[in-house]
Image: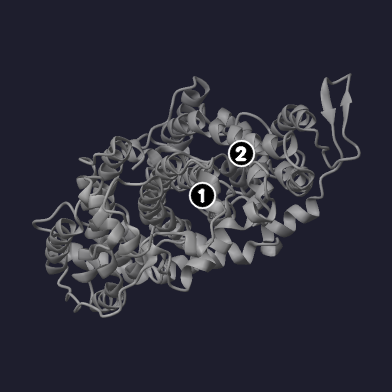
Amino acid sequence: MRPGLKFLYHIRLGSVHMYTQALDSCGTEPPSVAPAGEAERERQFQERIDRDEKIEPKDWMPDAYRQTLIRQIAQHAHSEIIGMLPEGNWITRAPSLRRKAVLIAKVQDEGGHGMYLYSAAETLGVSRGELMAQLLAGRAKYSSIFNYPTLTWADIGAIGWLVDGAAIMNQIPLCRCSYGPYARAMVRICKEESFHQRQGYEIMLTLARSGTRAQREMAQDALDRWWWPSLMMFGPSDVESGHTAQSMRWRIKRFTNDELRQKFIDATVPQARFLGLSIPDPDLRWDEASQHYASGPIDWGEFQAVLKGEGPCNRERLAARRAAHESGRWVREAAAAYADKHSDHRTGTGPAPGYAQAS
Amino acid sequence: MSSAAECTAGAVSAEERFRYLLRLADTSLVLGQRLGEWVGHAPALEEDLALANIALDLFGQARLLLAYAGQVEGRGRDEDQLAFRRDAPEFFNVTLAEQPNGDFGQTIVRQALLDAWQVELYHSLIGSTDEQLANIAAKAMKECRYHWRFSCGWLVRLGDGTEESRARVQAALDGLWRFTGELLTPDALDAHMASHGIAPPLALIRSRWEARLAAALEEATLRQPPPAYFPWHGKRGVHSEHLGHLLTEMQHLQRLHPGATW
């Protein structure tokens, strides 16, 4: 066993945005107009947030704040779980035993992050079973990035480098998010997440800098396919994103989508250069005036299509989750039945936490 | 090496030691590869994590054992050359390890049968006259004890769960039991290793394994199948049809790009 089954505590990078991206594009309920006493409570609540106090599960909070967080955390959790699939796709084919072990550990981390995030969502009054049911019914969002296929081994490197890299950009500010359980989860997660990003970059280094010609081509091809979807992970442009302002006022969000996207581009372009790979954007150039990279337009039509379920792997991803859920039903039922029979005198072999609700 | 006549009564040769180490290494490697197929598809998140965890341990064992086997062999083969550049007849895992996952019940039965074996085997190997093997065994035994807790726990839950779960897990047990003879029946190499104190006598492992399984099956309210006639010989390189496919998938990148580093 890995020491202390630490998988419970990690969270994956690639997910938060997914969260925010869908929130931004699908919309949350606008905060309702509060009745008289409520207005005073909301004012006090906002003052606490403005003082950078953490909001805890038992504290009063506006319903819209609660719903926004539930959706964001759940979407983050779902993204972790769905994100296990494209990477898990290469576990049996990883090209060395070391790479295989690292990949399994990473995918396992993602599952652990999912569990940890579902627990954070539960502090807001929604059960993991309920959230899982929404995902399987196709009613919940997860990051659009995981609807793209992993076609070669280099994709595993590109996901670590770009997808986890983009996620880190989003998650670091979430460590200061106003909701205590989410912020604390993110602190724990971020400590571990940069590790995944470095592992991904190291795969790319091996392929692109010291690899054979075929390996270099594989690396470039992966960058070509993952670059634009990675930029889309940050969600719609600020002008399109109607809910950024409220989320920022609540300090759930600290930077706008475009700010984070720019940060990511600025950090990543030199890394690609070091790899000797070219970013697939003919408009990309350093802008002296702004001291940032200027980049070409994002195909938001593709982004919207993937969100609507028309991406290359949307169907496969949900089908895989549903199949796992359905074919595991008898197992969960057996665990519940066993627990019923032996609930009075047995502790060692009872069902795992979360079982009853997960059926 | 596959017949008694080929095992010399005298000192243990590097070739013999190498082959014995591969039996242990390949069993962990192939079983880990099977469990890796589950990741993302298990009945619940907790089981996804547990199966991945067990797979990680098994790959860790395989890497230590393969690296040591490569040293013993003395031909400069490292863990990856041994894992990715041998064909099925050169793999010496027990046949049970390569059997397909089937449903969760079949995976659990396969796991429990092998966990019980590995726990007892590694426990005894801690006293091996081969110091390096003894050190690896000490680490592996602790891991395998956790694996057994997991698989035995599920065996009991599924056996004593619902009517459907009992039927499924009993069918899996009936289907896989025929591979257990190989775990417990010594061939010439096993006997040779035992005579030099490198490995325990399999008769000892048999009695402990049987006791462990009998208790678990009783608690699981499952019926122990009768012994089967056909003796499998994966540990001599004669496998079921499944191993070739497993290796095809596992080895394809290494074979497609010979000499590349990853």
Where disc 2 sits, the SS reads helix
Q: Which image quarter is the C terminus of chain A in?
A: bottom left
Residue type at mark 2 is: Asp
Say if mark 2 contacts mark 1, CB within 8 Å.
Answer: no
Does A356 sit left or right of A170 as displayed?
A: left
Q: Quadrant of residue A195?
A: top right
Looking at this view, name the residue that lies furthest to the right.
Answer: A282
Does A187 sit left or right of A159 as displayed?
A: left
Viewer-side label of 2, 1: 1
The answer to whether residue B75 is above or below residue B236 is above
Q: Which image quarter is the N terminus of chain A in?
A: top left
Looking at this view, name the residue that lies furthest to the left.
Answer: A345
The residue shown at (59%, 30%) is A249
Does A34 sit left or right of A299 as displayed?
A: left
> In front: B164, or A137?
B164
Residue B82 shows which numbered tag? 1
Near mark 1 (Cα within 10 A), the count class, few <14, some 14-19 or many ≥20, is many
Image mark 2: chain: A
Q: Position of residue A192 (x, y in %)?
A: 49, 32
Q: Position of residue B44 (x, y in %)?
A: 38, 59
Q: Position of residue A114 (x, y in %)?
A: 46, 47
Near mark 2 (Cα within 10 A), the count class, few <14, some 14-19 or many ≥20, is many
Residue type at mark 1 is: Leu
Q: Is residue A288 visible?
A: yes
The answer to whether residue A258 is above or below residue B120 is above
Per the image, the residue denoted by label 2 is A164
> In front: A20, or A211?
A211
